[in-house]
Image (cartoon, rainbow, N blue to C red):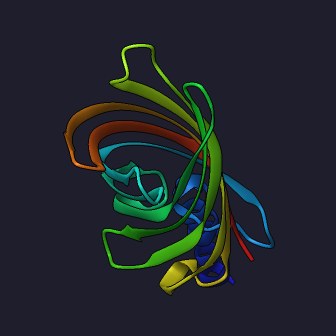
């Protein structure tokens, strides 16, 4: 009987001492996501094709590399919309895939732009195989070069959202 009480007490103590953020959500519970990153953007003005690579950190993922491919389309003077697919790779190699859509504004100087982004996951691997993710991001970009129809930029991104394990 003493052994049972000791084991039960030990199990309770371990459960209380474990940080909640280290435990995966059960049954679809949402975990807050927050992260930042920096990267490069390449945009082909003739086709609208864009390629972005961002490195940074994202809660519940650790250090990440985030890659996007998609289209950027002008919507008016100094404004644009975009749709991309993305892959985020965590430090351990697990990945999530998804889509982004959003709008952007080109500053009057023609060098700086800001983007508002919303995204959802469409699948994943490893520990993210049965997870879902919704995101909102703000991106500030600065043009670094123009070669023919190719515009290159650097960017800083801030991401917030919800991660759910099924």
Look at the image and tell me whether residue 135 can be seen: no
Camera-nearest residue between 46 and 140: 46
Q: Is residue 160 above or below residue 89?
A: above
Q: Is residue 158 above or below residue 87?
A: above
Residue at image position (46%, 76%) is 95
Look at the image and tell me whether residue 161 can be seen: yes
Camera-nearest residue between 132 and 9: 132
Residue at image position (56%, 77%) is 128
Q: Is residue 98 above or below residue 166?
A: above
Residue 68 lies, in percent from the top left, at 44, 63
Q: Is residue 87 above or below residue 157?
A: below
Residue 88 lies, in percent from the top left, at 44, 67
The single residue placed furthest to the right in the displayed view is 27
Residue 46 lies, in percent from the top left, at 41, 55
In the picture, measured across the screen, residue 73 lies left or right of residue 155, that is: right
Residue 166, by quadrant, is: bottom right
| Count of residue discs | 0
Residue at image position (44%, 62%) is 61
Camera-nearest residue between 94 and 10: 94
In the picture, measured across the screen, residue 20 lies left or right of residue 55, that is: right
Tell me the quadrant of the picture where the N terminus can be found: bottom right
Residue at image position (53%, 53%) is 19
């Amino acid at each position: 009987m003493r052994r049972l009480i000791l084991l039960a007490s030990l199990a309770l103590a371990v459960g209380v001492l474990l940080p909640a953020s280290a435990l995966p959500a059960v049954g679809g519970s949402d975990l807050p996501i927050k992260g930042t990153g920096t990267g490069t953007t390449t945009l082909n003005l003739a086709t609208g094709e864009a390629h972005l690579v961002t490195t940074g950190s994202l809660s519940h993922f650790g250090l990440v590399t985030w890659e996007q491919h998609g289209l950027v389309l002008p919507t008016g003077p100094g404004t644009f919309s975009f749709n991309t697919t993305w892959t985020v790779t965590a430090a351990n190699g697990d990945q999530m895939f998804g889509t982004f859509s959003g709008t952007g504004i080109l500053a009057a100087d023609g060098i700086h732009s800001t983007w508002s982004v919303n995204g959802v996951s469409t699948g994943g691997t490893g520990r993210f195989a049965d997870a879902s993710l919704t995101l909102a991001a703000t991106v500030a970009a600065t043009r670094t070069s123009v070669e023919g129809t190719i515009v290159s930029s650097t960017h800083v991104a801030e991401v917030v959202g919800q991660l759910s394990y099924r």
